[in-house]
Amino acid sequence: QVQLEQSGGGLVQAGRSLRLSCAASGTGFSINSMGWFRQAPGKQREWVATITRGGSTNYADSVNGRFTNSRDNAKNTVYLQMNSLKPEDTAVYYCNADVPRGPHEYRYWGQGTQVTVAS
């Protein structure tokens, strides 16, 4: 079983920065892609960013240029550096890890962390 533990987040003024972390734990696993989703009140969960094991990244247009997704494979940890935050970035942020098991891949989720950006 793989567990993801998130940290970071909180309340911040618009224009400031926050960093989220997400550490995967368990035994006998490797991780393919890791990334982040977010869910704002009354809205569906939306994809934010993905990083492959090799370090290639992709971002949603809404965060491209402001957010940076990175990972430390030795620590099975992914980070989301969020700069120039906007009120519309307010949401619960969830990390994910895609774990291969034989011919299949399973997605695990973090517990979620609240990010609130005040105008």
Image (cartoon, rainbow, N blue to C red):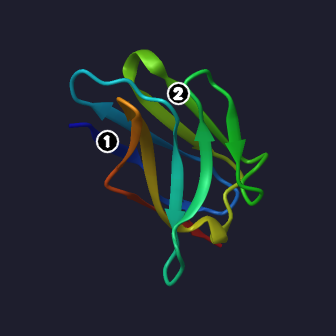
**Badge 2: residue crowd in 10 Å (few <14, some 14–19, many ≥20):** many
From this viewpoint, which residue is outermost toward the front?
103
Residue 116 in the image: x percent, y percent? Answer: 51, 66
Q: Is 50 located above or below residue 78 in the figure?
A: below
Q: Pointer 2: what residue?
A: 71
- Residue 67 position, x and y percent, is 67, 46
**Which residue is under mark 1?**
4
Q: Amino acid at mark 2?
A: Arg
Residue at x-position 41% and y-position 15%: 74
The alpha-carbon separation of the residues under discs 1 and 2 comes to 14 Å
Tell me: 42 left or right of 68: left
First reached walking from the N terminus: tag 1 or tag 2: 1
Q: Position of residue 107 (x, y in %)?
A: 40, 46
- The kind of secondary structure element at disc 2 is strand
Q: Nearer the viewer, residue 65 or 4?
A: 4
Is residue 27 shown to the viewer in this render?
yes
67 vs 64, left or right, is left
Number of other residues with Cα within 10 Å of mark 1, as a class: few under 14, some 14 to 19, many 20 or more? many
Using the image, determine if residue 96 lies above or below residue 111.
above
**On the picture, is 1 further left or further right than 34?**
left
